[in-house]
Image (cartoon, rainbow, N blue to C red):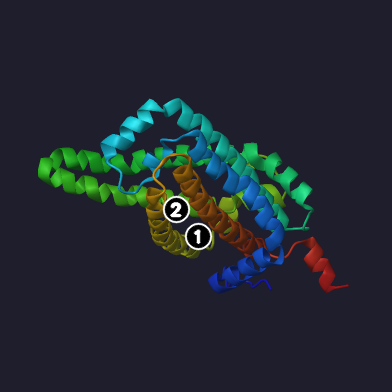
Amino acid sequence: MHELGAKGGMKFNMDQAWSRAIDLVKDSFQLLLVIAAVFLLLPSIGVYLFMPDFATLAQPGAEPEQVLAVFQENLATIVLVSGAAMIVQFAGQGAIIAMIGGKRPTVGEAIATGFRVTPSTLAIFVLYFVLYFVAAIVVAIPLVLIAALVGQAAGALVGVIAGFPSLFVSVYLAARLSMSLPVLVLEGTLNPFSAMMRSFKLTHKRQWSILIFWSILFVVYMVIALLFSSGFGVIAALAGGGTATALILGFADGLMEIATSLIICGLAVAIFEQLRGPDEDEVSSVFE
């Protein structure tokens, strides 16, 4: 059911969004698992197999100097392999949203939709970072000037404080653009600018509730991911390195990617349904 807010428009309900997301995923879980295994798990394993040194970059306790050295030595390979994996994963997430939202297509139709919206999804991903970079500079400029005026010791404190507005800008933009992929898939537009503007419009009246909701989920995800990766990191270390270690780490990352993507895509569709309100088919069915 869709609820109207006090000032018109659709009401965002966190509990209903979560329940609806779980139902959406459960209804097509077996098919979603097949899509997720191909488009999320396999690319994650492939990254570790094609880049043996990627395990160093992924270790939470790795020395910064060691990570930087590995990154510099393998920059071209990292960009190529990670970029290819990201594109495939974007297609998979688009397919998942197509599968659980709207008219419930076949697996083949959902995959085709996922690939069709991938260029637009990639464009939105790039535009997000451009917007964040510009906004972060605007926020940081006055703080940098203050840091230059107050001296080195106090300036360091100002520099630390400056990180919070930048973090807020990142989370705020992510929350406001969180409906972009559902718009691309379920409303049929392939224009990334139109999808971003539509997402901003949908989230406008409920932006703070949506921001808090995604922020809570992100914190929970970080805690679970840290514990999960630490546990598999120990198992991978016991494997002694080489292909076995790469497979274990890639499999662990792939499992996290599957769980995260299914939940996030389910929530994105559930929230989109709430904010958009009933479509024409739902309205007409009431009177039939």
- Residue found 48% across the figure and 49% down from its top: 248
Q: How many marks?
A: 2
- Residue 12 locus on image (x, y percent): 57, 68
Q: Describe residue 273's horizontal placement relative to residue 203 as left or right.
A: right
Residue 244: image tag: none
Q: Amino acid at mark 2?
A: Tyr
Looking at the rendering, in which quadrant would you find the C terminus?
bottom right
Contact check, label 2 and label 1, Cβ < 8 Å: yes
**First of labels 2, 1 by sequence position:** 2
What kind of element bears circle 1?
Answer: helix
User: Can residue 228 be seen in the rendering of this structure?
Assistant: yes
Q: Is residue 251 left or right of residue 24?
A: left
Quarter of the figure with the N terminus: bottom right
252 in relation to 121, above or below? below
Quadrant position of residue 46: top right
Where residue 266 appears, as percent x and y from the top left, is 62, 61
Residue name at image x 77 percent, y 58 percent: 104
Q: What residue would you read off at disc 2?
A: 172
Quadrant of residue 155 in the image? top left
**Looking at numbered disc 1 in the image, what kind of residue is underneath it?**
Gln
**Dot 1 crowding, Cα within 10 Å, few <14, some 14–19, many 20+:** some
- The residue that appears at 63% across and 51% down in the rendered structure is 37
For numbered disc 2, what is the local secondary structure?
helix
- Mark 2, other Cα within 10 Å: few <14 / some 14–19 / many ≥20: many
**Residue bearing mark 1:** 207
The front one of 172 and 66 is 66
In the rendered image, residue 219, in percent from the top left (x then y), is placed at 41, 61
Whole-number angstrom distance, CA of label 2 to CA of label 1: 8 Å
Q: Is residue 9 visible?
A: no
